[in-house]
Image (cartoon, coloured by chain):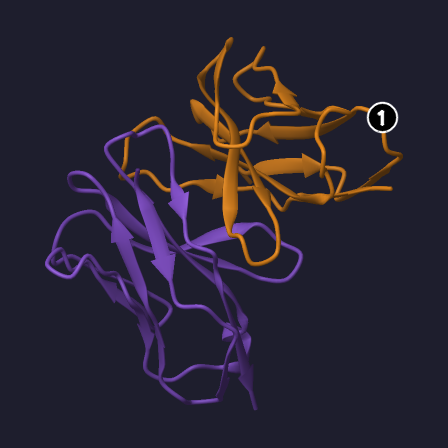
Amino acid sequence: DGGITQSPKYLFRKEGQNVTLSCEQNLNHDAMYWYRQDPGQGLRLIYYSQIVNDFQKGDIAEGYSVSREKKESFPLTVTSAQKNPTAFYLCASRWGGGRNSPLHFGNGTRLTVT
Amino acid sequence: GDSVTQMEGPVTLSEEACLTINCTYTATGYPSLFWYVQYPGEGLQLLLKATKADDKGSNKGFEATYRKETTSFHLEKGSVQVSDSAVYFCALSGRDNNDMRFGAGTRLTVKP
């Protein structure tokens, strides 16, 4: 079955440590996205990538970094510079067909930093 | 910039009651509009979409009509079930095709 796999489902880190969240898709989608979800705030865009080796900042990119070395993979690193990293992180992908294409989401990674 | 405003929750209904979740948008041009649903501990799933004015999206008994004159895309269902309990997100994809903007989400609880 085609889909998006995020791992791990739960992640715990100590403050000051960098952590990388995995996102893999086998939908052959060109575009991939990272969103952050906090209670009552909807989804906020962190980074997105429309093609391999290219990515752009979203609304809340500070303290995060990404790479897009393969079409299937778009890992997100939460750095120690992110002031409030505890959140639910969602990866999504989209066929490059423009505004009519819906996003397909993974099941998320819940990151807790203490 | 583009934005979506949706009815704040939580919403609690009895089984078989009618549901309406309001959604309005601000966008330049002619966006595509979406409703997504999120069950506990999961990612979002597409529920329905509409890509031009007066289009009606429908799925699993849910409907929403793209109203350009009122910039709205309200979600409706005539008879909700306990299994419809979830968080519902309204979203738009606009002139900037790189992004999708989401509302804050509305939590629906349906009681038997």
Across and down, in percent, residue B31 comes to 22, 43
Query: Circle 1 marks a residue in which chain?
Result: A
Q: Does A51 sit left or right of A85 as displayed?
A: left
Taking the spot 36% from the left edge, 85% from the top edge, the residue there is: B18
Across and down, in percent, residue A102 comes to 37, 42
What element does badge 1 sit on? loop
Q: Quadrant of the C terminus of chain A?
A: top right
Which of A5 and A53 lies nearest the eye of the viewer?
A53
Across and down, in percent, residue A40 comes to 56, 58
Query: Residue B100 sits in which quadrant?
Result: top left
User: Color of chain B here?
Assistant: purple
Query: Can residue B93 be seen in the rendering of this structure?
Result: yes
In the image, residue A21 sits, relative to residue A3, either above or below, namely above
Q: Which residue is mark 1?
A: A17
Query: Can residue A28 be seen in the rendering of this structure?
Result: no
Q: Does B29 sit left or right of B44 as displayed?
A: left
Chain that appears orange: A
Which of A94 and B93 lies nearest the eye of the viewer?
B93
Packing grade of label 1 (10 A; few <14, some 14-19, many >=20) is few
In the image, residue A29 sits, relative to residue B103, either above or below, namely above
Across and down, in percent, residue B55 comes to 15, 57
Taking the spot 33% from the left edge, 46% from the top edge, the residue there is: B3
